[in-house]
Image (cartoon, helix red, strand yellow):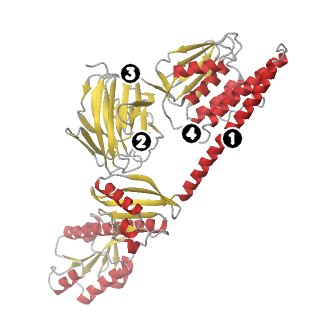
């Protein structure tokens, strides 16, 4: 039985009279005791005391000094921490009372009210539980340190080792205790490590996934160090160092594989293009009136296009795109049309001004070019192909009349593949890229009866709200349930907000956070820098939020920081709907400036490295009708344990103000 799950609460009563009186039993059960057990002598008391559920022994009657000592010895043999309470006939004074006190027992005279006995037993139960819980937690820690095989260690505020797991390749725990890294290792890296540790302790910083290479041992290690806190005070640091040599080796192998693959693709494209040019040149030297020769020319053109498409995608064959600058939809559509247009087809752009797609330009061109070719392949002699925007993406549709084409219906299904004759190449590329980027795809009918392809979960806009009337934060309150509560204060001299809170999460149906906010009537922009976030958990949150109301089920939009997962985007589109989450893949330097823009019923999220140059990363339709609350949100994601966040340069501006 784990005392963490089921704290012991049984009371054992031992005495010559057997079972305790009804009044004594009732008094004990009215307190913290869960049950009352009995024992008739010292031997049976010691045996019963060894049971896990027993948390206190009550000795009733008037034992002689040898009998009292015998009972205490029997109990100590069973459990050295078990408290003993003597419910004695004496008044708590005299030689026996002195003896019992010397044995660590508590004496309660039988002449005293039963409530006094209950209070003594309740206090003993609480003390024993604390001891057992502390002992079990200590055993768990020792098991973790000794059995995980990881180099986990604790160091005090001077960087000296307090405890170190005994693992192969690490220092001897006994010899290392009380020493710093430079005192253990006569290496330059040990001095650098010690200096970084002092920064972690003194500046309460977090060092996450720091890699170090030892050329002599050909060993790579990865280290994470965080402040070691006790009741809010920093006592030192906790660290874990892992051997990642094999991971680094495989990383090098993957880089080499990428290099060789790139070289292969380049050579393949070169060889195929050369032979295509020879074939096309020889074909052009002959009369092209023959229908079969025209078919050969078209096939060669298709091969050339396929080589270009797959070559473009192969350049990103192993690494998934990590983002970069958004792609202007209007410009990409025109460029793709210049490549993919055929015959008398015409391109029409519908409301794509200032619309940007959150993806690399090469990827957007591949999708548009192949959708254009498919759209222009209908049975209308001079079709019009339209490109426009939707709430969260864009569409490509045509004026043809082939929406019943089974190939189009198959496109939206998982497992769509190109036919053996090569047809469907365009759509297979589109499907692959859309799946790759977690976009959505639907196929429907255009107003003229042609095909309409809608690509979702990808569109962002590029124009933020202009600077308007400045708004001050004037409210601080909990949203949802905060067991440890929250607090916020503002340092006017440093222009910095400090916000602390616990909370289970802001995700799905959870909606716990501490929210420092202002209320605005119309469109609004809020921006700030998250200067520090205490790493209570990997997904602790500190960021900006716009929400319809303070109710837990209210719609909201959010962008902010996490200690271990980078920038997180959160939103709930409708009241009571599940909250959604998305994390950005960030480069070596993570974003720490964040911005939210509300325009009508849409909320756009942006990030920045310097607070000047902003990159819009998402835009969501969020039901925020009328006034909204905008400001700073913090959630530790650990119930009962608060995290602290610092926000700098907080600025809120209403649109259209002075």
Q: Can residue 41 be seen in this view?
A: no
Badge 2 marks a residue whose secondary structure is loop
Disc 1/disc 2 C-alpha distance (Å): 34 Å
Upstream in the sequence, badge 4 or badge 3? 4
Q: How far apart are marks 1 and 3 (CA)?
A: 51 Å
Q: Is there any visible trace of residue 579 in the rendered image?
A: yes
Task: Report the Cα–Cα distance between label 2 and label 3.
Answer: 30 Å
> Of the numbered discs in the image, which one, if any, rests on residue 590?
2
Q: Mark 3 points at which residue?
A: 600
From the viewer's perspective, is residue 400 above or below residue 456? above
User: Reading the chain from its start, which is encountered first: label 1 or label 3?
Assistant: 1
**Residue at left 74%, top 32%?**
272
- The residue where tag 1 is placed is 264
- Write down the residue under mark 4: 320
Question: For the residue labelled by badge 4, is the local secondary structure a helix, a strand or a loop?
Answer: loop
The location of residue 166, given as percent across then percent down, is: 45, 70
Alpha-carbon span between mark 4 and mark 1: 19 Å
Which one is earlier in the sequence, the residue at label 4 or at label 1?
1
Task: Establish if 424 lies above or below 167.
Answer: above
For the residues labelled 1 and 2, say whether their Cβ atoms are less than 8 Å apart: no
**Residue nearer the viewer, 408 or 304:** 304
């Amino acid at each position: 039985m784990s005392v963490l799950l089921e704290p012991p609460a049984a009371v054992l009563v031992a005495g010559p009279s057997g079972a305790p009186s009804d009044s004594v039993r009732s008094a004990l059960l009215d307190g913290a005791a869960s049950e009352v057990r009995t024992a008739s002598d010292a031997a049976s008391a010691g045996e019963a005391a060894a049971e896990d559920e027993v948390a206190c022994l009550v000795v009733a009657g008037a034992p002689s000094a040898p009998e009292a000592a015998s009972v205490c010895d029997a109990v100590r043999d069973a459990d050295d921490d078990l408290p003993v309470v003597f419910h004695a006939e004496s008044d708590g004074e005299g030689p026996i009372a002195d003896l019992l006190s010397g044995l660590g027992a508590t004496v309660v005279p039988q002449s005293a009210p039963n409530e006094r006995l209950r209070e003594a037993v309740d206090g003993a139960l609480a003390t024993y539980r604390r001891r057992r819980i502390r002992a079990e937690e200590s055993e768990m820690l020792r098991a973790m340190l000794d059995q995980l095989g990881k180099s986990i260690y604790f160091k005090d505020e001077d960087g000296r080792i307090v405890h170190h797991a005994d693992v192969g390749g690490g220092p001897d725990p006994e010899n290392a205790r009380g020493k710093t890294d430079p005192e253990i290792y006569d290496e330059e890296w040990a001095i650098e490590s010690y200096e970084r540790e002092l920064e972690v302790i003194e500046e309460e910083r977090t060092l996450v996934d720091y890699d170090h290479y030892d050329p002599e041992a050909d060993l790579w290690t990865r280290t994470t160090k965080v402040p070691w806190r006790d009741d809010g005070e920093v006592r030192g640091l906790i660290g874990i160092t892992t051997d990642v040599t094999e991971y680094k080796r495989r990383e090098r192998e993957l880089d080499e594989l990428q290099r060789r693959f790139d070289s292969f693709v380049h050579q393949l494209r070169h060889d195929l293009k050369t032979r295509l040019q020879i074939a096309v040149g020889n074909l052009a030297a002959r009369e092209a009136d023959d229908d079969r020769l025209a078919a050969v020319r078209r096939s060669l053109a298709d091969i050339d296009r396929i080589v270009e498409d797959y070559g473009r995608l192969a350049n990103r064959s192993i690494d998934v795109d990590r983002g970069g600058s958004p792609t202007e939809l209007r410009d990409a559509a025109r460029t793709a049309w210049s490549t993919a247009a055929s015959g008398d087809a015409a391109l029409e752009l519908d409301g794509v001004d200032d619309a940007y797609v959150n993806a690399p330009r090469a990827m957007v061109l591949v999708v548009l070019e192949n959708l254009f070719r498919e759209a222009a392949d209908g049975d209308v002699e001079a079709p019009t192909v339209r490109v426009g925007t939707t709430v969260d993406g864009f569409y490509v549709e045509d004026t043809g009349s082939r929406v019943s084409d089974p190939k189009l219906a198959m496109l939206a299904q998982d497992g769509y593949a190109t036919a053996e004759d090569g047809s469907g190449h365009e759509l297979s590329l589109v499907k692959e890229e859309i799946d790759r980027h977690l976009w959505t795809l639907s196929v429907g009918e255009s107003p003229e009866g042609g095909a309409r392809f809608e690509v979702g979960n990808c569109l962002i806009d590029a124009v933020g709200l202009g600077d308007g009337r400045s708004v001050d934060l004037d409210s601080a309150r909990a949203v949802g349930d905060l067991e440890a509560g929250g607090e916020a204060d503002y340092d006017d001299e440093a222009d910095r907000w400090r916000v602390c809170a616990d909370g289970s999460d802001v995700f799905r149906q959870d909606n716990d956070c501490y929210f420092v906010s202002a209320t605005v009537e119309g469109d609004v922009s809020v921006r700030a820098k998250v200067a520090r976030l205490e790493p209570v958990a990997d997904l602790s949150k500190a960021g900006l939020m716009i929400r319809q109301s303070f109710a837990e089920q209210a719609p909201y939009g959010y962008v902010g920081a996490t200690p271990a997962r980078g920038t997180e985007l959160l939103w709930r589109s409708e009241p009571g709907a599940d909250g959604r989450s998305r994390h950005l893949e960030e480069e070596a330097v993570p974003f720490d400036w964040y911005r939210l823009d509300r325009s009508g019923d849409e909320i756009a999220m942006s990030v920045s490295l310097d607070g000047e140059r902003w990159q819009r990363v998402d835009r969501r339709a969020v039901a925020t009708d009328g006034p909204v609350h905008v400001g700073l949100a913090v959630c530790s994601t650990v119930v009962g344990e608060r995290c602290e966040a610092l926000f700098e340069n907080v600025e809120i501006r209403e649109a259209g103000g002075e």
